[in-house]
Amino acid sequence: MNPAPSSTPFAPDGPSTASTAVQPLLEVENVRRSFGGLVAVDGVSFRVFPGQIKGLIGPNGAGKTTLFNLVCGLLRPDAGRIAFQGRPIEGWKPYRIARAGISRTFQNPSLFLQMNVLENVMVGRHSRARRGFLGCALRLPGQAAEERTIRQAAMQQLEVVGLAHLAMFPAGSLPFGQRRLVELARALATEPRMLLLDEPASGLNTKEKEDLADLIRQIRDRGITLLLVEHDMSLVMRLADEIVVLHHGARIAEGPPQVIQNDPTVINVYLGGNLDHATSSQES
Amino acid sequence: MSLMRRIPPLLPFLLCAGVMVSLQQLMRATGTQYCLTQLTMSLYYAIVVMGLCLLMGHAGQVSLGHGAFFAIGGYTSAVLTTHNFSAWGHSSLGGWLQQGGVLIAKEDVFGNAILTVSPWAAFLAAMLLTTLVALLIGYPALRLRGHYLAMATLGFGLIVSKLLVGSTLTGAADGINGVPPWPLAGSLTVTGKTAARVQNYYIACALVLLLLLLLRNLLRSRIGRALQAIHDRETAANAMGISTAAYKLKVFLLSAWLAALAGVFFTHFTGGIGPSEAGAFKSVRYVALAAAGGMANLWGVTVVSTALNYASLRGWFGSLDNAVFGILLILIITLAPQGPLKPLGAWLRRVLRLRNLSEERLERS
Amino acid sequence: MDPGNLALQYFLSGITKGSIYAVVAIGFNLIYSATGVLNFAQGEFVMLGGMVAVTLAQFVPLPVAVTGAILAVAVVGCLLELLFFRKLRHHSILHLIIITIGLSIVIQEAALHLWDEKVRSLPYFTGNEISSVRVFGAAISPQVLWVLGAVGVSVAGLHVFLRYTLKGRAMRACSSNPEAAMLAGINISNMRTLAFGLSAGLGALAGCVISPITMTHYEMGGGLAIKGFAAAILGGLGNPMAAVVGGLLVGVLEAASVRYLPAAYNDVSAFAILLLVLFVRPHGLFGAPAGAQVREH
């Protein structure tokens, strides 16, 4: 994959003032989802523009994971609209959304433990390959070449995350942090337009978080738009171009990190804990 | 480079072919070639278990009714090639079908002229019917979770079994006899005649080896990886763009085809088929054999299945025939759910992986 | 016989068969609630009850034989739990169900060898095969009243047990929340054994009571298990009382199919009901849609 030019167009003043004619990559409009009597997501709207790193934060139980699952197709919204590249995707099955160009990682790395690392990433290439049952069973000449291409592309992604040396290791033998990276490589292998990261930094130490941040920026520079749910405030404030804040299922703020940090509603919600920490590390 | 790379993958097939030939030669030498009949039947049964290996070991689904597909294949061929379609012979459609070789004129046991479907056409019809039924049952059934899927397939198998026993078209409890031989190509014919016994043994061997080759290719490809992914973590597989529902259905269909194919060959070989082939005992037996052969291990499943079915057909289990497979099922699932061949497989894999790694190093340099 | 009368006959015959299915279904539910396993050997308990009672009845009076059979089969049920399911708790549910299928086959074959393939039956509890009683204008055998009575009493007894006794409430606790039950000091393993024993005993009672009407033979368990499961799932798994409704419905529908389908296809209707319920409405009539983890998506 060739890296895209690093200038990434997005509306600097917030999504409501899209002065350029750039279409949002992902549009979430008034999405609502409840479970029995509990309203998990209550009329949330936001947009993600191409080339953005968008952060999704909020206290526990704010509805972030539910929102994530709604975008990925694991859940169906009760009301509202979700559009990707202009096409409505609410109600689509997860695999269809994945094929449309949205890839995701999971909070607990969901590797295929019976395979080795390389094979895991090769699964990510699945939707980019064509040969069907008959072609594979008969081992037609095109199939062998395609298999080689899949392998090479998978190795490339492993190199991007720095784990090429572990290609042949069984996935189950890797420590947590490395499993995260393999899952990331696998998601990248699908050649997504947009990558959804579910708490990518949880369980990582400081050094690993630094590397992750670099990696995420690298990914953005290659032209992939990112939406990440994260609890680590300092990481989000450093990485994200824009942040959406959820509380009790509703959006209470949206904007660049500077704006969010100083928003009184947001500060109240977090009661001064994490945000102060974030501000101080920003200044140092 | 090609030859050196190709030999290791083909080695098991060559070995297997060698074993098959040796067995036959051994039987000839000891004058026990009549055993070839049971061995041939066991080989056809093994094909059903190969399909189950794919469905259960790789796609992670379960079917307790696969005997029904075997029966659908066998019975369709049997009915079409023995039923008299003379009533059609006089119509223009009938004439056209006769011209095309679909309907053939021959004499029945009493010397009367009858019109039956040609074995090749009957085979195609059997596969078509199997496809229809598999899709009809598979589409709703595969949405169910494990234990409910098990019960649904069991119920399906029982329905087919009862329908076969209950209708006169399929010969009720007696089944169908007098199924004609099936001329495959040239002088190759699937038949139970003693003179063609050795030939038919090799036909079965060739079929098994061919299917093993095709399935092995399939499992080593991206499709095989996708199946493994679905079996391992279905949600993650979906998130990677794999339509798990579609794949499960395709594998179910493939396994049904294999069972039906085996049924057709079996029926022409033995000259008949009975309703017990669709029964729960047989279906559970297939599952027991798949489990004993190592669920996901194609070779293990084929070898174990052939061996145990042969023993059963030769009567070595006597009156305890069904009980043996019931006990086998319990023992395997309790003690070694992945199959007893797994430790052996792991060792082999370690050996092969070392070879893969050295290949990689050669590639890089 | 006028059509109304005929319909009533079919209905009563359906209710009779249906109450046996109901007992098997209740057994399924009991074990499912306590262990999460669908015990395919449920039908064998019915068969064993009849077989053991027939053998015992050669030596002791009928009531003693029936009681003895119920106790013996209940012990068998407890043994099954102790030998297999206690040790194998860590296996996946699917594995356990396959094991019960294997057990069902082994039990059938064991029955074939212990007794033989001949069909047997207990004598009628009251009267004989030609005595009849008039109910709403239809003539039925007194044994039918025994069947309905026995099943009715067991269902009521079970209901009382589960609702009002300490042991029964403990069992309900185990099924709804095993961890909490354990913390409350309830011995889950023993509860599971009890569930198996109860199911087996109830099945045996059904087997004894139905024996004069439908005969007992070693192969009857398999079909009964499937039909009982169809009844359980029609009512909605997890709800023992719904299982009764499910059983009666399956019985009546089957009797109706006897009326309209050729004789050989009688059994098919029950199996078809099973498939229909699983495909269309897996949580059954009275189960909770969200609660039933039947579908994957």
Image: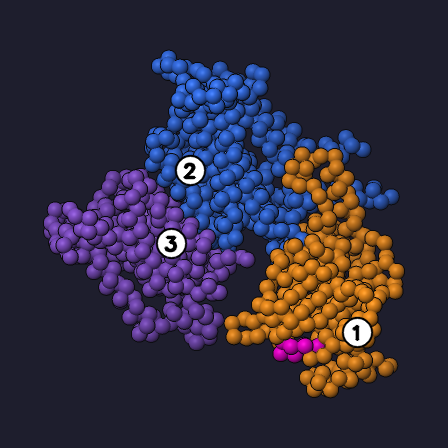
Chain colours: A orange, B blue, C purple
Contact (CB < 8 A) between labels 1 and 3?
A: no
**Can you name the residue that lies furthest to the top here?**
B111
Magenta stretch, residue numbers: A245-251
Disc 1 residue crowd, few under 14, some 14–19, many 20+, Cα 10 Å: few
How far apart marks 1 and 2 lie (CA) works out to 68 Å
- In the depicted view, which residue is nearer to us: A269 or B269? A269
Pointer 2: what residue? B278
How far apart marks 2 and 3 lie (CA) works out to 20 Å
Kindly identify the residue that appears in the image at 71 percent across and 77 percent down: A245
Badge 3 element: helix
Residue A17 is labelled as 1
Q: Chain of mark 1?
A: A
Task: Left or right? Give the position of B280 relative to B23.
Answer: left
Counting from the top left corner in percent of width and height, residue C6 is at 20, 48
Pointer 3: what residue? C229
Pick the quarter of the image with the C terminus of chain A. Answer: bottom right
Kindly identify the residue that appears in the image at 40 percent across and 51 percent down: C274
